[in-house]
Structures are given as C-alpha cells and as structure tokens.
C-alpha cells in the first residue's frame, strides 16, 4: 500500500466506494470535494477533505501539496451522461479536469495514478466479437459526446505514461449497486420501477458491474497493474428485462413493465428525453442509452483477472443488494 491516497470525485458513487474500502484497509485518504458539496457528510470520518475543483485553474495546488513518490492518486472525477446534448461541462470535467490532474501528478512526481475511464472509450467491435482493451483510443473511433470525452482523456493519460508517469487506466462497464445516491441511469429506472411508475422499458442489454467490485479492482490495479496499460473492469452481460425481474424478485413485486422492441424504442427515445428534461426528471431513456443497449456489450476482463485476480460477483447478488437498499430508502421516505 501507499503512504497516502488522493481521490478526486470522492463523493460520487464510485469515489465514495473507493474511499470506504481504503478506510477499511486503514489507509490515509485525502478527498477532493467541491465547495458546499451536498454529499460530503457521507464520506467516512477518517477521510481528510480538501476543497477544490478539477475544472478550475490552480484549484488543485492544496490537494497535491504533500503528494510525492509515496502517493497514489485515484482519479474518479467525471461526468456520466446519456443526454443527447450534455453541454460543455462534460468536456470541462472529463477532459480538462484530467489534464489538470495529470499536470499535478507529473509536477509532484507521484508514485502512482489510476485513471478511471469507461468501456465507452473503447471502439466497438461487431456483435459476436469480444471487446478487449488492446486497441487504439481516439474520440473519432467512438460515438456520442460521453464516449468521446472519455476516449480523449484516455489518450491524455497514455501520453503521460509514455513520458514517464506511473499510470494505469481502468475501464469499468455500467456501474450499478447499492449506494447510488446521485441516481445513475439504471438506478433511476429501478427507482421508478419500484415506485410503480415505469410503464415502459427497453429490450436489449449491456454489461453491468457492481460498484464494490470496481472499487476493489481499482485498488488491486494500483498495487499490481502494469504501468502504461489499461484494464477492463466489467461484470456480466444482462438484459434490462432480466435486471428488472431480479430487482422485482428481491422486492417481492409482481408488476412488470412492457419492454419495447429496440426499433420502437429508437422512435420513442427523443420524445422521452424531451419530456424528462421538461419535467426535470432523471434521464435514462434517450437516443444514446437506446443505442448503448443495442450495441455489442460483450467485454472481457481477462487481463485484469490474470494481472491482479479481478473477479466480479454474480449479478443476482448486486441487484438484490441494490433492491434492498432502494426499498429501505423508500420506507424512510427518501425516494
């Protein structure tokens, strides 16, 4: 283990899971948090917080003040978006923020950097082919603003590694599980489902992974990952229909939404996105999300398994725990 760990995006779904796991391992953890961050109280009390913003020039100086060769930086900060027009903030955080973190890491000559990218940064292969991390990365090879922003940031990190930075990259698939207070796409869908307010879902599926497994994979990579290399941290391919069935089973629900064929879903998605934006509801049914569910979602985590024994838990366990957590929040009136 390293003497200290610096985590960006520490109050997010994944960053908080990483911080909690490090605290369990009795590590010294420093978290970068935004001014007036509404989720800061959820971090373990042992975590030292520093106010800063990866988007603001010179905002990271205090966070990196004591960083050295015995420091591991885990860059989790990022915006995940399925919106058709996510706005400039997406690139400011995912690309500009990564560039500023890299500058500080190289300036301080930190011992290790783990950059959290996404499988969306990896060019898709035809259906029937297994997608691996052994490929070229470029925003021109992927579709959608989110994927392009993650591919661009990935390029920056690999370039820094070629210049001597001890950096590795992890590529999680769709992260789900208990504790997603910010409400990712599937969490928002599951919440509506449990409330009986999800009349329609979409056929198709993707690879999803438990947030706790990704957190453990990140820490394993920090210890044993090869510098300058990337590792897919995927879970299991599963259809949306099956996911909702498992959530419903855990919650003892008989209600089942109608699953639209992908052709109809593509036609309905623009309207659903506009309606959600108008009603200020979470986005989970958009042209981009439908395209993802129709894409090749078969990823291999063999490289991570071979290098640092990465092994995701069964999807049934993840969805059961997620349903239990959501139902507990519902009973408390927090949903």
Image (cartoon, grey):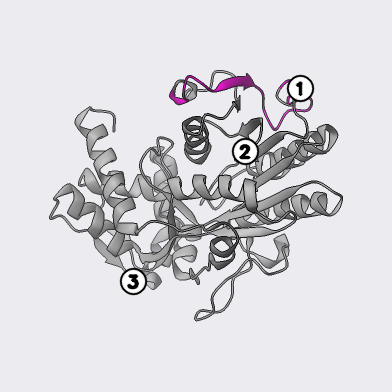
Whether residue 197 is visible to the viewer of this picture, yes or no, is: no
Asked whether, in this view, residue 136 is left or right of residue 276, the answer is right
Say which of marks 1 and 3 sits in front. Answer: 1
What crowding class fits label 1: few (fewer than 14 Cα within 10 Å), some (14-19), or many (20 or more)? few
Residue 212, percent across and down?
44, 45
Q: Which residue is mark 3?
A: 261
Q: Which residue is mark 1?
A: 65
What crowding class fits label 3: few (fewer than 14 Cα within 10 Å), some (14-19), or many (20 or more)? few
Q: Seen from this angle, which residue lies furthest bottom?
A: 128
Earlier along the polypeptide chain: callout 3 or callout 2? 2
Whether residue 105 is visible to the viewer of this picture, yes or no, is: yes
Question: Does 54 lie within the magenta span?
Answer: yes
Residue 114, percent across and down?
66, 45
Say which element carries label 3.
Answer: loop
Separation of residues labelled 3 and 2 (CA atoms) = 48 Å
- The magenta-colored residue range is 42-62
Question: Does 36 lie within the magenta span?
Answer: no
Q: Which residue is mark 2?
A: 1
Earlier along the polypeptide chain: callout 1 or callout 3? 1
């Amino acid at each position: 283990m390293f003497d200290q760990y610096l985590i960006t995006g520490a109050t997010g779904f994944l960053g908080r899971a990483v911080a909690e796991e490090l605290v369990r391992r009795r590590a010294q953890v420093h978290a970068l948090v935004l001014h007036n961050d509404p989720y800061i109280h959820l971090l373990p009390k042992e975590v030292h917080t520093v106010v800063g913003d990866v988007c603001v020039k010179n905002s990271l100086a205090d966070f990196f003040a004591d960083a050295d060769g015995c420091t591991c930086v885990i860059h989790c900060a990022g915006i995940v978006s399925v919106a058709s027009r996510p706005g400039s903030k997406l690139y400011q955080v995912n690309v500009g923020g990564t560039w500023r973190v890299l500058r500080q890491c190289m300036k301080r000559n930190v011992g290790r950097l783990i950059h959290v990218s996404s499988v969306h940064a990896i060019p898709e292969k035809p259906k029937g082919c297994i997608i691996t991390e052994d490929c070229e990365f470029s925003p021109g090879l992927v579709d959608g603003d989110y994927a392009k922003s993650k591919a661009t940031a990935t390029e920056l990190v690999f370039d820094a590694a070629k210049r001597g930075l001890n950096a590795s990259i992890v590529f999680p698939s769709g992260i789900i599980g208990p504790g997603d207070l910010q409400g990712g796409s599937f969490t928002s869908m599951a919440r509506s489902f449990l409330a009986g307010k999800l009349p329609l879902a979409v056929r198709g599926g993707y690879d999803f992974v438990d947030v706790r497994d990704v957190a453990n994979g990140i820490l394993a990579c920090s210890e044993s990952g090869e510098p300058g290399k990337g590792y897919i941290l995927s879970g299991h391919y599963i259809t949306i229909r099956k996911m909702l069935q498992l959530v419903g089973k855990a919650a003892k629900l008989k209600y089942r939404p109608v699953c639209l064929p992908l052709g109809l879903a593509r036609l309905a998605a623009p309207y659903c996105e506009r309606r959600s934006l108008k009603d200020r509801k979470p986005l989970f049914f958009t042209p981009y999300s439908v395209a993802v569910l129709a894409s090749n979602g078969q990823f291999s985590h063999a490289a991570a398994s071979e290098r640092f024994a990465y092994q995701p838990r069964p999807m049934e366990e993840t969805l059961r725990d997620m349903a239990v957590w959501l139902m507990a929040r519902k009973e408390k009136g927090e949903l």
